[in-house]
Image (tube, grey):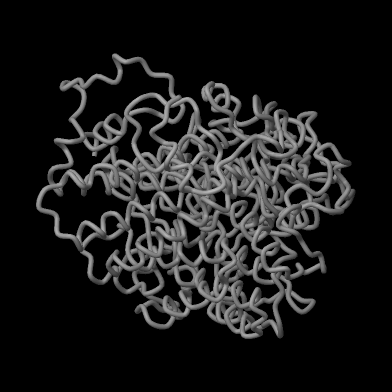
């Protein structure tokens, strides 16, 4: 894999808007292969495609600095479902409205990964363009096989562009590897980019084979192309075509929802502390079961397993997303003043397996936490909590509540009793940092076996999947296809959208079902079903645009215009003014109990504003493009509605070879 990394990263040429000298452009046979030589054979092409596949999963798993932040968490920070919660971090990224600017706020570190998304998404486009740019030089390639490679490359490019246009809006559109520095890019309108990637995905869906006809697990297949095509059709207002493709995926492609236990049962670390009652939701989300043949629900999965340091990426879900339950500070005490919970390792004399929270739920440090909506209120339907919903069920071990933990300091008079949030006599908070230390979470999603810690009897660092373990993850599975079809039916006015949402609920064991659905009901079900699978901010942004295209109202009766939905309300308007704005804005205002609600941490207010629907185009990209002008987004310094943009993708492609 190391050889492939060098090959791809260097032969791809220039980084986007990079300032490179002529010396850098000259071939150096000691450091890389000539693209025209490498891509004369199919193995070289296959290696490049494998790198594209591997790169895709880094959006979920790539970590930075102290292994406490991965990119997809940033997607959830800009949503109705989660916020940053590392309360001892003076730079905690919660003051989004005031701090996120073209010149500041965006990072690739522990506080957020916004810069990562810009840089790595364009890198992913570059990797895909490498294949399409050099494939004609591959000798003896059958036309059918060639088109399959092109289709897979189109998938990777379209996946990245669909992300970019709903994170950043109008962006530069690049379809080839440049041979000389280019610093005169112009932004291309979102609608033009969406039109082109939709056409590309139509091609890909025709030529890329089904998974059953492929030997490689984790490579782009026809089902993955069809899923992305559905999203492209939705984003271009072709709702009937989106429904038709979902019909094929659901009814004619060999996939099926998993409705009963399957695969191998993994007991979840320490059964005496947290016994798992086997169920389909638990089995479905064991990484060891995600990519097996018996799992008929997987459309496209991302392998991430083994001891190869070059191919495996540690995924510390339990460390980053779990609550900081063993905080030794004065913020978390038992009623008699002892530290609430100790993280005993197995070699300590005080250790007892029934109190082994390290192995049962991991050593969380609460970097990101769910909102109250994600924890509690979204799990209610028809006015009551659906106790049958396995996705929010603590009785079987799928969901975990803090008061399930028991005090485990033998010197405490409360030893063995369940945690209390408040003192039983005085009513005082026993956990004063409820942002970081006290919240419920979907254990079935966060739990990953830490094989490194498991092998060390003295370890107190059970963080998630470590080298030698398994962190296979879903990119697409059939449950999302049902919800995408429901969305398409909603825009079409088809009442059977309700059936699709209820099908997902019935599989989860729900007893409360919908009688009819709004777009809000569909987005709620996505939140319940696809946590840490969907890119929540991108999906809310996409649906905001789709609502405007469809002229359908949201769940509160608001209607949106394509011309104004992302620009309603001045960027400096009062933060508590919920009027106007996009559907994304409405969801954040109504469901996120932190932003704009007066919550403060480290002297920073949790604030977000309407214009943060789109992230600012980085100033570094704007200044490096010194022979052209990129369009800045509404609400940020540098915004100019008169900035020229390419109206069509053909204009952008024609301009790619022009450097002056």
Point 64% across, 78% down: residue? 492
Rendered location of residue 507, percent (x, y): 53, 79
Quarter location, residue 149: bottom left
Query: Is 187 or 329 nearer to us in this picture?
Result: 187
Point 40% across, 48% down: residue? 56
Tally the numbered discs. 0
User: Would you say residue 175 is visible in this rendering?
Assistant: yes
Query: Is 442 or 253 nearer to us in this picture?
Result: 253
User: Would you say residue 346 is visible in this rendering?
Assistant: no
Rendered location of residue 568, percent (x, y): 80, 49
Which part of the image, by quadrant, shows the C terminus? Answer: top left
Which part of the image, by quadrant, shows the N terminus? Answer: top left
Quarter location, residue 572: top right
Query: Is 356 or 84 nearer to us in this picture?
Result: 84
Point 33% across, 59% down: residue? 220
Quarter location, residue 146: bottom left
Query: Is 17 or 535 nearer to us in this picture?
Result: 17
Say whether residue 327 is left or right of residue 63: right
Say whether residue 292 is left or right of residue 59: left
Give above or below for 194 relative to 387.
above
């Amino acid at each position: 894999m190391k050889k492939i990394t060098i090959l791809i990263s260097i032969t791809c040429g220039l980084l986007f808007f990079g300032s490179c000298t002529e010396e850098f452009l000259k071939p150096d046979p000691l450091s890389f292969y000539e693209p025209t030589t490498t891509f004369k054979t199919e193995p070289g092409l296959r290696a490049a495609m494998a790198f594209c596949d591997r790169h895709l999963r880094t959006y979920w798993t790539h970590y930075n600095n102290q292994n406490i932040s991965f990119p997809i968490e940033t997607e959830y920070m800009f949503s109705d479902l989660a916020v940053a919660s590392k309360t001892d971090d003076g730079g905690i990224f919660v003051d989004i409205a005031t701090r996120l600017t073209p010149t500041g706020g965006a990072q690739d570190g522990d506080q957020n990964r916004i810069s990562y998304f810009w840089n790595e998404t364009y890198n992913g486009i570059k990797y895909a363009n490498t294949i399409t740019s050099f494939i004609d030089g591959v000798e003896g390639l059958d036309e059918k096989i060639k088109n399959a490679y092109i289709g897979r490359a189109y998938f990777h490019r379209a996946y990245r562009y669909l992300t970019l246009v709903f994170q950043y809006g109008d962006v530069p559109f690049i379809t080839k590897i440049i041979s000389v520095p280019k610093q005169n890019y112009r932004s291309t309108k979102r609608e033009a980019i969406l039109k082109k990637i939709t056409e590309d995905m139509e091609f890909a869906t025709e030529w890329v084979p089904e998974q059953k006809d492929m030997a490689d697990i984790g490579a782009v297949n026809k089902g993955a192309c069809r899923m992305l095509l559905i999203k492209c059709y939705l984003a271009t207002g072709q709702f009937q075509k989106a429904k038709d493709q979902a019909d094929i995926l659901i009814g004619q492609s060999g996939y099926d929802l998993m409705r009963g236990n399957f695969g191998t049962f993994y007991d979840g670390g320490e059964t005496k502390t947290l016994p798992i009652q086997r169920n389909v939701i638990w089995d479905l989300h064991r990484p060891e079961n995600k990519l097996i043949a018996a799992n008929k629900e997987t459309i496209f999965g991302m392998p991430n397993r083994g001891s190869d340091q070059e191919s495996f990426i540690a995924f510390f879900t339990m460390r980053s997303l779990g609550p900081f339950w063993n905080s030794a500070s004065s913020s978390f005490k038992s009623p008699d003043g002892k530290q609430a919970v100790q993280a005993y390792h197995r070699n300590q004399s005080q250790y007892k397996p029934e109190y082994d929270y390290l192995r049962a739920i991991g050593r969380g440090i609460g970097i990101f936490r769910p909102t109250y909506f994600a924890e509690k209120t979204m799990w209610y339907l028809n006015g009551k909590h659906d106790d049958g919903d396995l996705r929010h069920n603590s009785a079987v071990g799928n969901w975990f509540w803090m008061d399930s933990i028991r005090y485990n300091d033998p010197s405490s008079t409360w030893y063995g009793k369940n945690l209390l949030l408040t003192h039983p006599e005085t009513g005082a908070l026993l956990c004063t940092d409820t942002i970081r230390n006290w919240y419920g979470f979907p254990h079935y999603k966060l739990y990953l076996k830490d094989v490194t810690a498991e092998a060390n009897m003295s370890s107190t660092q059970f963080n998630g999947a470590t080298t030698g373990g398994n962190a296979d993850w879903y990119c697409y599975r059939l449950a999302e296809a049902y919800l995408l079809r429901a969305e398409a039916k909603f825009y079409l006015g088809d009442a059977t959208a309700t059936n699709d949402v209820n099908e997902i609920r019935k599989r989860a064991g729900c007893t409360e079902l919908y009688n009819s659905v709004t777009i809000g009901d569909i987005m709620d079900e996505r939140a319940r079903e696809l946590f840490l699978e969907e890119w929540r901010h991108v999906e809310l942004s996409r649906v905001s645009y789709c609502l405007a295209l469809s002229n359908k109202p949201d769940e509160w009766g608001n209607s949106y215009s394509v011309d104004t939905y992302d620009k309603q309300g001045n960027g400096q308007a009062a933060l508590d003014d919920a009027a106007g704005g996009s559907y994304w804005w409405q969801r954040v205002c109504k469901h996120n109990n932190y932003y704009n609600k007066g919550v403060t941490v480290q002297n920073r207010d949790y604030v977000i504003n309407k214009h943060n629907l789109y992230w600012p185009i980085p100033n570094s990209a704007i200044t490096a493009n010194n022979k052209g002008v990129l369009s800045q987004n509404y609400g940020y310094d540098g915004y100019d509605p008169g900035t020229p943009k390419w109206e069509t993708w053909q204009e952008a492609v024609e301009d790619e070879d022009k450097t002056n």
